[in-house]
Image (cartoon, rainbow, N blue to C red):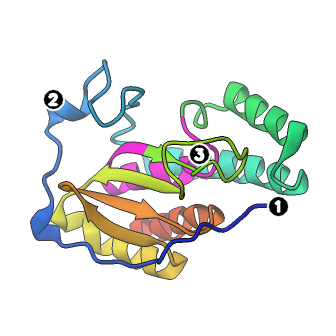
Amino acid sequence: MLDRADVEIRRTVDSALLVPLTDAQASTESGMMLNHHYVDVRGCSLADARLALAEEAEALEQLEAADWAGDVADQLMDDAYHESEFLFGFDIGTTGAIHALSAAGATPITSCNGGVIDGEKHSCDVPTILFSATADILPRILRAADVAEVGLINNDGHVELFADWLPKFHAFAEQLLVELES
């Protein structure tokens, strides 16, 4: 069973505190200090974001059927990572939101599903995605966050998206893509 994280959901982003990444910082091939396994997914198209979301939805459905744990879930995640164009390199449950944020013009920096699927220790205790953004793209992201009931806060010049329940990231991604397509 997928557990909910114990976190207060709030949306308190102050766009005056944003320090967007430069192109040189975001295009690094050696990783950045915040994420040594950084993958540059900037400029994702809406079509690719939709494909990433669909692949993730299939993986999440299979994980739910496996009750989110055990050897079956481990094998499902391993298979998804090796068979997917979009899932490799990201924790299951974060991929759709990462690609939707990219399609919105944000630069995803680091992400973690909080270990809520496999129960192993992860870098964060809650599902989270840290991204760089400019003030002009925030309104759509905030609207999507409000609908999906996920949190958004400032984090050292960037924005942190977080959730108390991993499937909310998928709902956020769906809503953000709707925002972008309108």
Classify 168 as above or below 39.
below
Q: Left of 124 or right of it: where is 26?
A: left
Using the image, tell me which numbered label, if any, was put on residue 1.
Answer: 1
Disc 2 and disc 1: Cα gap in Å?
Answer: 42 Å
Q: Is residue 77 magenta?
A: no
Q: Residue furthest left?
A: 16
Q: Residues within 10 Å of mark 1 (few under 14, many from 20)?
A: few
Instruction: Residue at 27%, 29% (x, y): give it.
Output: 32
The residue singled out by tag 3 in the image is 52
Q: Nearer the viewer, mark 2 or mark 1?
A: 1
SS of the residue at dot 1? loop
The answer to which of marks 1 and 3 sits earlier in the sequence is 1
Amino acid carrying mark 3 in the image: Ala
Query: Residue 22: x, y in percent?
Result: 13, 39
Q: Quadrant of the N terminus?
A: bottom right
The answer to which of marks 2 and 1 sits earlier in the sequence is 1
Q: Nearer the viewer, mark 2 or mark 3?
A: 2
The residue singled out by tag 2 in the image is 24
Q: Which residues are magenta?
A: 90-110
Query: Residue 124: x, y in percent?
Result: 49, 50
